[in-house]
Amino acid sequence: MPTRTLGRTGRSVSAIGLGTWQLGADWGDVSEEDARAVLDASAAAGVTLFDTADVYGDGRSESFIGGWLAANPGSGVTVATKMGRRVDQVASNYVLANFREWTDRSRRNLGQDTLDLVQLHCPPTAVYEDDAVYDALDTLVEEGAIAAYGVSVEETAQALTAIARPHVASVQIIFNAFRLKPLDEVLPAAQAAGVGILARVPLASGLLSGKYDEHTEFAANDHRSYNRNGEAFDQGETFSGVDFTEGVAAARRFSELVADEAPEGTTPAQAALAWAAQQPGVTTVIPGARNVQQAESNAASGRLPQLSPAFDAGVHAIYDEFFGAAIHERW
């Protein structure tokens, strides 16, 4: 598994990480046994970054990881958590007192005295522009509650604002073959500034696996059912904001591209992860996994050889045909 330096944290992490939203909530039910097996399989396959959040299952995901860390001392895994979605989404809630409360809760859940990386969890735009927010985060570093901090964003403009801040270690942003806008400015800016990029939703909520059709149904407690049009949170988080039927059609084309241009035996999901991970400026890609097979398959994508220019051109052609006009300017 290739490794990269995670921006200003100075930590070495795997090119393919593990997103653990699935282990907490919003993707149907995942048992504690299955969650532990996913963490075990990911680490065994060379994954050294777990991404979580205090709001995933109201701390369930963090607690699973905390238990795993306790059972695997010296694992070398970096845990990136997020904070800020447990309160009303107004800028006035992003203050030091709340930051202390939230990080103390995450420290208990994860069993860590000092959190490796804490990311603001897609807060209101004004938060990214507020000097006092960064002063408060610097205070947490000085106090030893956190080792480093970053941001998670919905929009590229928010990412660029954060990258310009001198102590922001990383930016987490939606980036995949159906969401190409970060290629324009965000990835080059992060690379120039030495800021890490965590690419989330790398499979467009599973669309890029090629396993869905127009008739696929998801469980009622799966965000792909209840947030398809942004009913519960930002629409861009579910299927990357693309129309599901259009996404299924584009995914068929993507699967054909994989069959024509990717190494033999590569699945569409693996090709999608490898393509994202191989883009200059991307530090790590954080797909989720609901079972051991998915975890192992995701990790294997980090060991694929460099994809061809023809494959990259095909990704851009599909995006331009299906999504460019509808998606590119939105996020």
Image: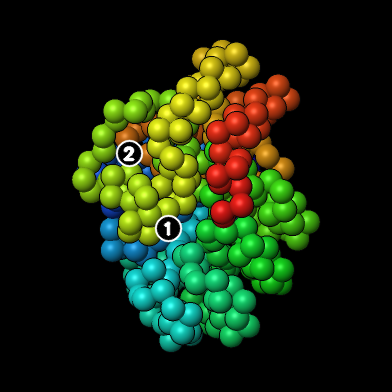
Between label 2 and label 1, give the one nearer the viewer: 1
**Amino acid on which the number 1 mark rests in the picture:** Asp
* Residue in the image at 36% along x and 65% along y: 54
Quadrant where the C terminus is found in the figure: bottom right
* Residue in the image at 62% along x and 58% along y: 156
- Residue 35 appears left or right of 106: left
Q: Is residue 330 above or below residue 250?
A: below
Q: How is the image coloured?
A: rainbow
- Residue most toward the right? 192
- Residue 147 appears left or right of 225: right
Coordinates of residue 147 in the picture (x, y in percent): 56, 69
Looking at the rendered structure, the secondary structure element under dot 2 is: loop
- Residue 140 appears left or right of 162: left
- Residue 301 appears left or right of 110: right
**Amino acid on which the number 2 mark rests in the picture:** Arg
Q: Is residue 95 above or below residue 249?
A: below
99 or 223, which lies in front? 223
Which class describes the residues within 10 Å of circle 2: few (<14), some (14-19), or many (20+)? Answer: many
Disc 2: which residue = 290
Q: Is residue 296 above or below residue 43?
A: above
Rendered image quadrant of residue 129 = bottom right
* Residue in the image at 28% along x and 50% along y: 226
Q: Is residue 215 visible?
A: yes
Coordinates of residue 32 in the picture (x, y in percent): 23, 47
Rendered image quadrant of residue 90 = bottom left
Disc 1: which residue = 234
Looking at the rendered structure, the secondary structure element under dot 1 is: loop
182 or 49, which lies in front? 182
